[in-house]
Amino acid sequence: MKKFYAFLMVLAVSLSLGCSTPERTWLDEALDYCAAQSQRALDELQPLDYTLSPRNIAPDAQHWSTRPVSKELWTEGFWPGILWYSYEHSGNAAVRTAAEGYTEALGFLKDMPAYDHDLGFIIFCSYGNGYRLTENPAYKEVIVAIADRIIELYNPQVGTLLSWPREVENFGGHNTIMDNMINLETLFWASEVTGDTRYAAIARSHADVTMQYHFREDGSSYHVAVYNAESGAFERGCTHQGYADDSMWARGQAWAIYGYTMCYRFTQDPRYLAMAQKATDIYLKRLPEDHIPYWDFDDPRIPNAPRDASAAAVVASALVELSGYVDMETSAHYLHEAETMLRTLDTAYRAGEQSPAFLLHSTGHHPAGSEIDYAIVYADYYYIEALLRLKQLNQQ
């Protein structure tokens, strides 16, 4: 996992030359808040049933709504990931025990055929963080086994992973969604720890094809790209969770920024860095004044459209890393933007006493009318990740 924090070395140099950083006291207080909310959630979930995964909290609710762990969900890895991050900050042994329990409840997935791309989200957020902090060899085995499952979805004619096998008929072809970029981390990591280049080769192919067809000239992205499964030809870009086929869905753009930043970490391919920056720059250019995006940048109801704190958290975390790969001036800009996002989330989007979540006001699947203005578990995951990245930056 050495490359995971390699970007901090570059950031340390830039900081020593005068780039500003958030105050340590603010970061510590924000992370203490997350740790307290995590403990509060665990207290409310007693007795713990590791097969029930916290998912969301409705605007009028006060406790986590849980779902039975199954292959039908994609968010199951975020809760154990939150607990691993909370343990990393607090050192609380009871939180570690809970993190282990919720993580290991997902182990059954390694023995199942791939059902969609979300396996990477589920396993690397849980087992990946667990292995990083404990070096438990059993966790490594599960991650590599999941990498084997993920590559079952690869179509060599297209050059990408199939995202949703269940949606092939609906989309009329091989569908690849921008979210899938995050799952490539499992494949790159599996290649590093096993020496098997197959995983990384498939990850690079997916990133290359996505870079070619998934983006518009200005750097905004389609949510879904549809390909002919036999010929591999690109057929169309469209949306599933955004406002329109040609709109910029906030969380989709966030996945693009995070995904290509991560790809550059593993490959040092300058094309991925350029793509991450291009996707970032259009996103930052179109943000509202408080730096928290509306759920879709092109919703005509703006400024009366819902916000999406989850997209803000994903981008803030990505920007901390991305700032370590660019020149000093751009680095300072990206760090300033990340801090602004996090400070707004910390002040205006905190759940506080209302519920044990970290953040309010995320948007899940707006076109389906699902999870609009909710607290959602993946917003909390990327929020605490971003805070930890900034704290680790300060400690260099």
Image (cartoon, rainbow, N blue to C red):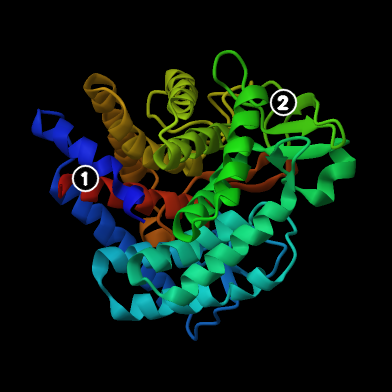
Residue 244: numbered disc: 2
Callout 1 secondary element: helix
Q: Nearer the viewer, residue 123 or 27?
A: 123
- Residue 297's image quarter? top right
Residue 372: numbered disc: none
How many numbered discs? 2
Q: Position of residue 129 (x, y in %)?
A: 41, 62
Point 29% across, 59% down: residue: 33
Mark 2 neighbour density, 10 Å: few (under 14) some (14–19) many (20 or more): some
* Image height of 71 relative to 6, above or below: below
Left or right of 321 on screen, residue 169 = right
What amino acid is found at the position of numbered circle 1 in the picture? Leu
Mark 1 neighbour density, 10 Å: few (under 14) some (14–19) many (20 or more): many
Extreme residue toward the bottom, this view: 47
Point 47% across, 42% down: residue: 309
Callout 2 secondary element: loop
- Whether residue 77 is visible to the viewer of this picture, yes or no, is no
Q: Position of residue 76 (x, y in %)?
A: 58, 64
Q: Position of residue 196 (x, y in %)?
A: 54, 55
Which quarter of the rendering shows the N terminus?
bottom left
Left or right of 349 on screen, residue 76 = right
- Whether residue 180 is visible to the viewer of this picture, yes or no, is yes
Q: CA distance from mark 1 to mark 2?
A: 38 Å
What amino acid is found at the position of numbered circle 2 in the picture? Ala
Left or right of 303 on screen, residue 214 = right
Q: Position of residue 217 (x, y in %)?
A: 59, 13
Mark 1 touching mark 2, by CB under 8 A? no
Residue 393: numbered disc: 1
Point 33% across, 41% down: residue: 342
